[in-house]
């Protein structure tokens, strides 16, 4: 499956940027955002929902998208052919400020993925593997709900990488996303939230210096 929109040949990040530029003040509901994608695959929906979770210091939006992420991942695990959000989740809204932060942060933190990704290890992106991946992505998405600062970023990256791998039939990205997510969840279970939070704070200044403010 091509990563570009069939109608206008825009990448997912470009679609998010266009949405943010044209959004009303109160933004869009998640269902309206999915309609903008014009995409019936799980990968695009999961990537879009994971995008705000990948952006450090973006507050509020990750909490809006975490449960819908779990819902889509669970549907993948159950073998559903198309993603669907119930009204209680689909009517959740991201305002223009949040969409703008998603667009700018997504380009800054994940812009490289569009040039790096290519079809490889495609057997990992097949239907059977997709169901297993849905199960593990559901776990990664659930870990975003841990009530600690910055705990959405690592699992957000894990879901985003794996989801983009599905879109572009890039099994390598799926593997990297899965490894990152397993390391994160294992760290939470073995070391405990306090130790993980300390490690996050230790690396926060390094990341900020690496990518700029």
Image (tube, helix red, strand yellow):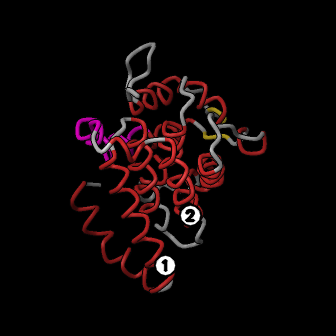
Q: Position of residue 128 (x, y in %)?
A: 51, 47
Label annotation for residue 188: 1
Category of crowding for the residue at label 2, using alpha-carbon neighbours closer than 10 angstroms: few (below 14), some (14–19), many (at least 20): some
Residue at the farthest right position: 87
Q: In this orientation, which residue lies closer to the viewer: 187 or 196? A: 187
**Residue, disc 2:** 139
Q: Position of residue 93 (x, y in %)?
A: 66, 40
Q: Position of residue 38 (x, y in %)?
A: 55, 23
Specify whether 139 is left or right of 121.
right
Report if residue 108 lies within the magenta region: yes
Q: Quadrant of the C terminus?
A: bottom left
Residue at the farthest top position: 7
Q: In this orientation, which residue lies closer to the viewer: 34 or 164? A: 164
Alpha-carbon distance for marks 1 and 2? 12 Å
Q: Residue at x 46, y 56 (%)?
A: 156
Q: In this orientation, which residue lies closer to the viewer: 82 or 62? A: 82
Q: Is residue 30 above or below residue 52?
A: above
The image quarter containing residue 81 is top right
Q: Earlier in the sequence, mark 1 or mark 2?
A: 2
Q: Of the residues tagged 1 and 2, which is closer to the observer?
A: 2
Q: Residue at x 56, y 27 (%)?
A: 23
Specify whether 28 is left or right of 185.
right
Q: In this orientation, which residue lies closer to the viewer: 202 or 11? A: 11
Q: Is residue 159 above or below residue 12?
A: below
Q: Which residues are magenta?
A: 103-119
């Amino acid at each position: 499956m091509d990563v570009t929109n069939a109608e206008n040949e825009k990448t997912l990040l470009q679609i998010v940027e266009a949405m943010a530029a044209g959004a009303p003040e109160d933004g869009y509901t998640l269902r309206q955002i999915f309609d903008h994608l014009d995409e019936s695959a799980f990968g695009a929906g999961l990537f879009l929902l994971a995008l705000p979770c990948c952006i450090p210091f973006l507050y509020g939006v990750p909490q809006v998208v975490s449960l819908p992420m779990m819902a889509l991942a669970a549907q993948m695990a159950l073998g559903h052919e198309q993603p669907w959000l119930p009204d209680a989740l689909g009517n959740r809204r991201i305002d223009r400020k949040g969409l703008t932060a998603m667009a700018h942060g997504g380009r800054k933190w994940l812009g490289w993925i569009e040039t790096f990704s290519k079809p490889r290890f495609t057997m990992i992106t097949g239907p059977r593997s997709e169901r297993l991946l849905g199960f593990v992505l559901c776990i990664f998405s659930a870990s975003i709900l841990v009530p600690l600062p910055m705990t959405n970023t690592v699992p957000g990256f894990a879901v985003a990488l794996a989801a983009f791998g599905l879109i572009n039939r890039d099994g390598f990205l799926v593997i990297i996303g899965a490894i990152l997510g397993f390391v994160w969840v294992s760290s939470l279970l073995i070391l405990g939230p306090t130790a993980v939070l300390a490690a996050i704070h230790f690396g926060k200044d390094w990341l900020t210096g690496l990518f700029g403010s």
